[in-house]
Image (cartoon, helix red, strand yellow):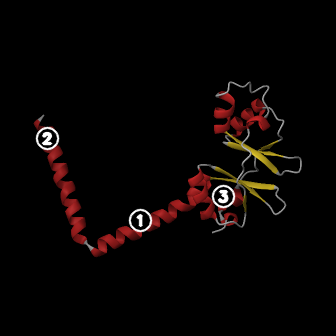
Amino acid sequence: MKIKDRPEFRSKAAVLTFGPKALVSEAVAIMSERNYGAAVIVSPDRKPLGIVTERDFMRRLLNKRLDPDKTTLDQIMTTDLKMARADDDLLDWLRLMSNERFRHLPVIDDQGIIISMMSQGDFVSYTWPELMGRLKEQAKATFDVSPSIVLMIAGVAVFAASVVTIFTQLQ
């Protein structure tokens, strides 16, 4: 499935962007007000230069005891950006985000201009139904192949419940 095929891609609010010389305090106030975990730092032509996340605020601002009223976003932003295109495969990016431990993925057009931002949460909404479907298939296969296992598990559960009940009555 392509990123652009996800309902989340089509229904996303506009990407929160700032110029590189915006103050951290301004970004924090707006991100907090709008409940955003990340913002993209862009050039005047809306090409991504970096990203700033809650983690950047913690590690690069608070940990270094920098003043948010004097520190600009270009001083703390992550510049090693991974950027996707709307036609990219969703599962490829989900795998990369998981393996490389980043949660926000700017999506750019053919000219390199920011058009959206997907989060790991957006992608998880895709994988959950797929995972549940696989679990149903596996459970069905287990029940079809070996009903004795189901009876054995049920028997152990009943036995355990009985022991707990008897034990609590003895006390």
* Residue indicated by mark 2: 167
User: Residue 78 location in percent, x, y?
Assistant: 71, 43
| In this picture, residue 90 sits left or right of residue 114 | left
- Three-letter residue code for mark 3: Glu
Q: In which quarter of the image is residue 99?
A: bottom right
- Closest to the observer, 144 or 54: 54
- At numbered mark 1, what does the secondary structure look like: helix, strand or loop? helix
Sequence-earlier tag: 2 or 3:
3
- Three-letter residue code for mark 2: Phe
User: Residue 30 location in percent, x, y?
Assistant: 74, 36
Location of the N terminus by quadrant is bottom right
Residue 135's tag is 1
How far apart are the two marked residues, 3 and 1, measured between alpha carbons? 24 Å
- At numbered mark 3, what does the secondary structure look like: helix, strand or loop? helix
Answer above or below: position of 57 versus 112.
above
- Residue at position x 30%, y 71% in the image: 143
How far apart are the two marked residues, 2 and 3, measured between alpha carbons? 51 Å
